Image (spheres, helix red, strand yellow):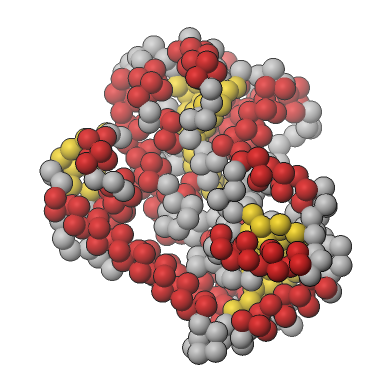
Amino acid sequence: MNRLSSLSWHEVRAAFQTIWGYEDFRSPQGEIIHALLARKDVLIVMPTGGGKSICFQLPALLQTGLTLVISPLVALMENQVQELQEKRLPAALLHSELPSFKRRKILQALAQQKLRLLYISPETFFSPPVWQILCKPELDITAIILDEAHCLVQWGDTFRPAYRRLGAARRALLKSKPLGTKISLAAFTATANPAAQETIHKVLELQKPEIFRLNPYRSNLNPSIRIAWTPNSRKKQLLNFINNRPQQSGLVYVRSRYDSENLAAWLEELGYATAAYHAGLDAEERRTIEKDWINDKLQFVVCTSAFGMGINKANVRWVVHFHAPLLLSEYVQEIGRAGRDGKPSDVLTLVSEPTGWLDSEDKQRQHFFENKIREQQQTAQQLARKLPQQGDIEAIAQKFPNSLIALSLLHSNGQLKWLDPFNYLILTVGKTQANNQLNVTKQMRQYLYTKQCRWQFLLNGFGFSKNIENWRCGHCDNCQ
Ligand SMILES: [Zn+2]
């Protein structure tokens, strides 16, 4: 039952004050909550730190059904669920590393409709014991919330093939529910350019979504790009930059585990309080580093893109991209870790000169990424020829390792359709259109070598081009 009719806006705000103790919503929190209570679809592009979790937690708690929150990282979900449980709210987290007695308990609570919020990874969401319960006709599902929706767009380290089956998931769930049931779908992402928004819209099969986009401009972030002529000068520039900011908290981004270990070891030897951070560390090691950094025991961390999602530190004064990311959206997310407190913060990127003659590292990384995508495409096309036109992914995955990535790639090419989250239909074999995954890296390179105002370039790239034709930020390297 939809309770909105019986809930006045006054009651919604009162619940907000009782549970969280804030006076009123920040825009667009109120509008999003309103849309979700009306069981509408929503697409939200909101930088981290914008108070997004309240947007779906409050509607979930005000309704009687279950809200599923799908998120890529266990650590991200743990923090939120812990906060909710401390307030004695009916929320739980289900993931594959839980001991089986805890898992059983949560599945039981789920089946008995005792939970209002269930946090879950996309893979666990599709696992048979969970899926079977979710499909029970009497189980009331209010909404599916997709956090970090860029994981279905970005074809890099953060890509998750299961995300591409989520649109089909709602379709399948609705089939098992009484006629006329509504389940709203909300997708949250920190960054998405217009093309990425379109992809999210299409893949999730959003129905007339209300769209909320927060302008990513941050007047306290000063972006600059500097050319590093040789590998040595890259290191020297990094040292200069850090030495000019004694005791200021920061982050150094690199693109691989190897680089993170290597650079951190070198800096530690020089006496800096730092550590390497990447997805290869176990959860406990990562928690320790996060804590030490948040408490200023480490001045900075040398990290890959694995660092950041869900970590909040207000006084980060600088971010250096020792190696630039390949995607502009990754760049914006990563510089966004700086200056959350609103104070001026410097974000520097080091790049080799465009030809790559003296320092070929950046070029190599680019080629490595492009080759990997080409290889994945080839594998996907080969697989498409071998597979039955229609089939069950579980059976396919057993026969062909890595087939889930391949199927997702065919889906992103428009060559495949999900009949339901577990069954595909191949539409065309062979010809692929020009690969947009390769085009997206061009934008980042243009950004690195542009003479234009950096912020103007970024705002244009993210679809905020209105009224900024002659606008300049006045605080990036190109403006100064
Ligand atoms: Zn500027």
Instruction: State the residue at coordinates (48%, 12%).
Output: 108
| Nearer to the camera, 182 or 280 | 280
Question: Does residue 171 appear to the left or right of 462 in the view shown?
Answer: left
Question: Does residue 129 appear to the left or right of 358 in the view shown?
Answer: left
- Percent position of residue 394, x then y: 26, 35
Q: Which quadrant of the figure has residue 284? A: top right
Q: Quadrant of the C terminus?
A: bottom right
| Nearer to the camera, 274 or 246 | 274
Q: Residue reaching furthest right?
A: 246
Q: Residue reaching furthest front?
A: 269
Above or below: residue 73 compared with residue 138: below
Instruction: State the residue at coordinates (57%, 57%).
Output: 305
Instruction: State the residue at coordinates (28%, 46%).
Output: 401
Question: Does residue 80 appear to the left or right of 103 in the view shown?
Answer: right
Is residue 106 visible to us here?
no
Above or below: residue 72 compared with residue 16: below
Above or below: residue 413 compared with residue 390: below
Q: How many marks?
A: 0
- Percent position of residue 359, x then y: 55, 84
Q: Which quadrant of the figure has residue 245? A: bottom right
Is residue 125 visible to us here?
yes
Instruction: State the residue at coordinates (45%, 13%).
Output: 111
| Nearer to the camera, 283 or 144 | 283
- Percent position of residue 44, x then y: 54, 46
- Percent position of residue 159, x then y: 44, 51
